[in-house]
Image (cartoon, grey):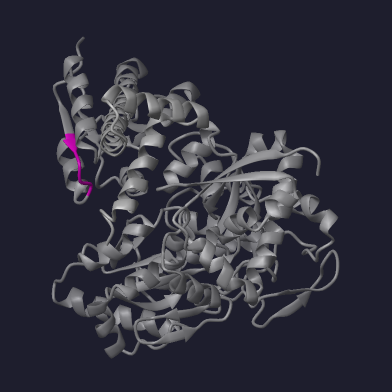
Amino acid sequence: MSSRSLSILVIDENRPRASIIEAGLREAGHERVTIVHDVNAIARRIADIEPDVIVIDLENPNRDMLENMFNLSRAVKRPIAMFVDRSDQAAIEAAVDAGVSAYVVDGLRQERVKPILDMAISRFNAFSRMSRELDEARSALESRKIIDKAKGILMRSRGLSEEEAYALLRRTAMNQNRKISEIAQSLVVASGLLDGGGLP
Amino acid sequence: MSATHHITAGFLPLLDSAILVAARERGFAAEEGIELALMRETSWANVRDRVAVGHFDVAHMLAPMPVAANLGLTPMRLSLVAPMSLGLGGNAVTVGNALWAGMAEAGARGIDDPASAGAALREIIAWRAGRGGERLCFAVVHPHSGHNFELRYWLAACGIDPERDVEITVVPPPLMSDALAAGRIDGFCVGEPWNSVAVAGGHGHIVTVKAAIWKNSPEKVLGVRRDWAEAHEDRLAALIRALYCAGEWCAVPENREDLAGILAGEAYLNKPVGLLLRALEGRVETGGGIAEIADFFVPAGKAATFPWQSHALWFYSQMVRWGQVPHSAENAEKARTSYRPDIYRRALAPLDRAMPSASMKVEGALTVPTPVGATAGKLVLGPDGFFDGAIFDPATLDAYIAAQAGAAAQEA
C-alpha cells in the first residue's frame, strides 16, 4: 500500500445520490473525494482537483462537454480513458445499466479502480431501488387516503358503518376486477361532480 | 412481412431525427415488419455507450461519429458502421445580439453569404485583440461533429484561426440558448430547432447556415455496431427501406405540417409546432426577418440518404486538420469503410429507386443541380459546393490534407 490515495471526483446533479456515493467512498477509505453538482466552470475545478477517477451520472447532458474537456491537455494533465479497461465489456454494461459512467487517468492499475467503479454502480443501483420504494410507499399512502375519503362518502350518503362501507368498496372492486383504490377514486370524483364541490 | 422484428433506436431531440420519427409514427417501419422503439437521449456519449452495450440496436448519430469510433478516438473500443445517411443540412451558426450588432456594422450580409459574415467576424476579432479583450467563445455539440468541422472550416476560410483566434467549447444542444443568454458563449453552431429557440428567446441572431457553408452536406447517419449489422443483415435492410420511404414522405411539402406536429410531441422535441414547421420549410427567422434557404434540410432526393464515402473521407480530412488523428493510408481506409454504400444498395434494391452508381464523388464539383449516373431511373445531385469554392477530390486526399496544413503553417 505504498501509493498515495486516489483523488476521486463525483459529478452528479442529484444531491442525495451524490451524498450516498461520497459516504460509500469514504467508508471504503477514500479521503480525497470531491462532489460537484453544477458543471458550469468545472474546467477550473478539474484542474485544481487533478482527479484520478471521475464518476458521472448518465442523465447529465454535459457528458459530451466533459469528454471533450478530458481530451484537452489544458484541463487535465494526464490523458483520461473511460472505465476500468477499454475492453472490460461486463464492467461497461453494469455501469450503463446502473446509469453511471466513470473515467480514469491512463496508467492507473485496474485493481485500484475496479472497487471504486463497483462501489459507484452498487450505490447507483441502491439509490434507484430506494427511489422506487419511496414512490411505491407514496402511492400506497395516496391510495389509503382516497379509500378513507370514499368510505366517508358512503357512510354519509348511505348511512353505512365504516366496515360496511369498506366491504361495499371491496365487493364492487372484485365484481369489476379493479383495484379498491380505483373504485374509491371514481367514487370521490363522481361525488365531487354531483355535489358541485370542486367545480369551477 | 411475416415475422415482426423489434428494433430499438436512440436519438437526440433534433429536427434531423425526423426520418426515424416518421418511420415509426407514419407506419413505414410497420410496413417492413419492424416494431421500432425510439429512445430519446441526453448526450451523444450516452447514445454511443448504449449502442456499445446493446441497449440500442441502431442510433441517430453525428455523421463523423462512426469514423471517430473506428479510428479509436472514443474513450471505449467500438466498431461502428454507417449504412445510411439521415439527410443533408439542418444546422446554423448563431451569435449573441451584441456580437451580431458589431458584425452587421462590419458588413455581414444575409445568411446565404458566409464569406461576408466571416470577414465581419474577423474584423471584430482583430479589433478585440487590439484592445486586449478576451477571445470570443463558440460552442459546438461534439468534437466529432459536422458542427465542429463546418464551423472551423468557415472560420479558417475567412482567415480566422479556430485554434488561436477563438475558443471552441462543447455545449449540449438544448443548453445552447441558455449559455448564450448567460454570456458563457458568444455564438454556436447547432442543428435546428436550437438556433430558432435562441432567436425566439431574443438571445441571438442566425448569421449563416450549414447549407451555405457546404451545400447539401452530410449531418447525421444511422449508426450501427459492426457486429450487429453483420448478424442482422435482413433486419437492417428492412429498417433501411423503412427509413428511405419515411425520408421520401418527410420531403413532400404537404406532409410537413403533419411531420412538424409529430416532432413537436412531448416524447420527441417538445417544442412549438410553428418553430419546427418553419425549419422543415427552410424558412428561418434569423432575428432580422425570415430568410428562405434552398436545401436547408434535405431528407430525400439528391441521394440525401446515400452514405457517400467521400463524406466520410472529408470528415477524416478535418480530423487530421485539427489534430484529432494522424494521417496515414491505414487511417484513411478505416475512415472510408466506416460508410457502407454496399449495405445501402443491397437493402434498397427491391424498391427500384435511383441510386448513385459511384460510392464517392468530388465534393464541390457541382455548382447547380446536375443529372448523374444512377442504377435506376433519373438522379439529380447537387449543388454540393463549399462557400469558398474549394474542391475536395477524395482521389487526391493526401494533397488536400497537405494543402490545408500548408495554409495553416502560412497563417502561423
Can see residue A83? no
For the C terminus of chain B, give its image quadrant.
bottom left
Q: Nearer the viewer, residue A21 or B147?
A: A21
- Residue B182 within the segment the image draws in magenta: no
Q: Is residue B232 left or right of residue B353?
A: left
Q: Is residue B280 left or right of residue B339?
A: left
Boundaries of the magenta span: A35-39
Up-down relation of residue A67 to residue B28 (above or below): above
The location of residue B372, given as percent across then percent down, is 78, 73
Which residue sits furthest front? A159
Q: Is residue B399 left or right of residue B276?
A: right
Q: Nearer the viewer, residue B57 or B115?
A: B57
Q: Quadrant of residue A145?
A: top left
Tell me the chief SS of the magenta region. loop
The location of residue A81, given as percent across then percent down, is 38, 34
Which residue sits furthest top? A1
The location of residue A117, given as percent across then percent down, is 33, 23
The location of residue B323, given as percent across then percent down, is 42, 53
Up-down relation of residue B99 to residue B358 (above or below): below
| Rendered residue at 43%/85% (across/down) | B290
Q: Quadrant of residue B130?
A: bottom left
For the N terminus of chain B, give its image quadrant.
top right
Q: Nearer the viewer, residue A69 or B184?
A: B184
Can see residue B174? yes
| Rendered residue at 54%/72% (across/down) | B280
Q: Quadrant of residue A128?
A: top left
Count of marks placed on residues: 0
Q: Nearer the viewer, residue A168 or B182?
A: A168
Q: Is residue B343 left or right of residue B206?
A: right
| Rendered residue at 29%/72% (across/down) | B201
